Image (cartoon, rainbow, N blue to C red):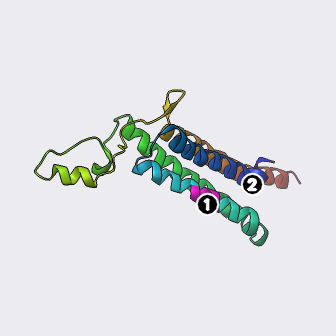
Amino acid sequence: MIKKNIYKISLLLSTFMLLSAFYLEYFHGALPCDLCITQRWFHAVIISYCLLTILILDRLLNAKTILLIGLAFTWLASSIAGLYHFGIEMNYWKGPDDCSSNIDFSKDTLTFLLNKSPIKCDEVMFKILGLSLAGWNALLSFLMSLTIIFKTFQKGKKYERSFNQR
């Protein structure tokens, strides 16, 4: 049941996450940094992938396992991007120079500041239950990736058991 609907679940979850980010941006002033926008692209890819698979590829291809693994890797990439951003927010590691609060006070400071995004990647703009949006993205994306991988290979084991019992 879950394996049949995994594309629909992925589509709904990714759409919800993307729409939530836009809602927080436009109605609550939680402006995105460069890494936030990068994470949004992963969800746009997941939504496109799911729509393409639901509407076209699932009917044309027999390689359903490859489609599921592709979806799992896309969710995993989203999780890695979220984890990277979350680590920057929590100061576990340093982010890109053009996306942090660190300012290099040199003779070109004004030019540097004018060319830099005003939203910093190492500052949490919004939290839900004590976890930043990047943290939630990392967690939910990783759980979706694990679920898809588990369900993809679970069917193979059931098939082997039923085949061996004959």
Q: Is mark 1 on a helix, strand or loop?
A: helix
Res 20 visible: yes
Q: Position of residue 21 (x, y in %)?
A: 54, 44
- Badge 2 marks a residue whose secondary structure is helix
Q: Residue at x 24, y 49 (%)?
A: 113
The reply to whether the C-beta atoms of the residues labelled 1 and 2 are less than 8 Å apart is: no
| Disc assigned to residue 156 | 2
Q: Earlier in the sequence, mark 1 or mark 2?
A: 1
Q: What residue type is labelled 2?
A: Gly
- In the rendered structure, which amino acid carries the disc numbered 1? Gly
Mark seen at residue 70: 1
Secondary structure, magenta segment, majority class: helix
Q: Crowding at label 2, few (<14), some or many (≥20) Cα neighbours within 10 Å?
A: few
**Residues in magenta?**
44-48
| Residue occupying the far right of the picture | 166
Magenta run includes residue 103: no
Foreground residue among 40 and 23 = 23
Cα distance between the residues tagged 1 and 2:
17 Å
| Tag of residue 34 | none
Residue 153: tell me if it is visible: no
Viewer-side residue, 130 vs 67: 130
Relative to 147, 128 lies left or right: left
Residue, x 75% and y 65% (percent of image)? 55
Mark nearest the camera among 1 and 2 is 1
Identify which residue, 88 or 109, lies in the foreground.
109
**Total number of numbered labels?**
2
Where residue 154 appears, as percent x and y from the top left, is 73, 49
In terms of image quadrants, where is residue 56? bottom right
The single residue placed furthest to the top in the displayed view is 129
Residue at 14% x, 44% y: name it: 105
Question: Looking at the image, which is closer to me, 151 or 32?
Answer: 32
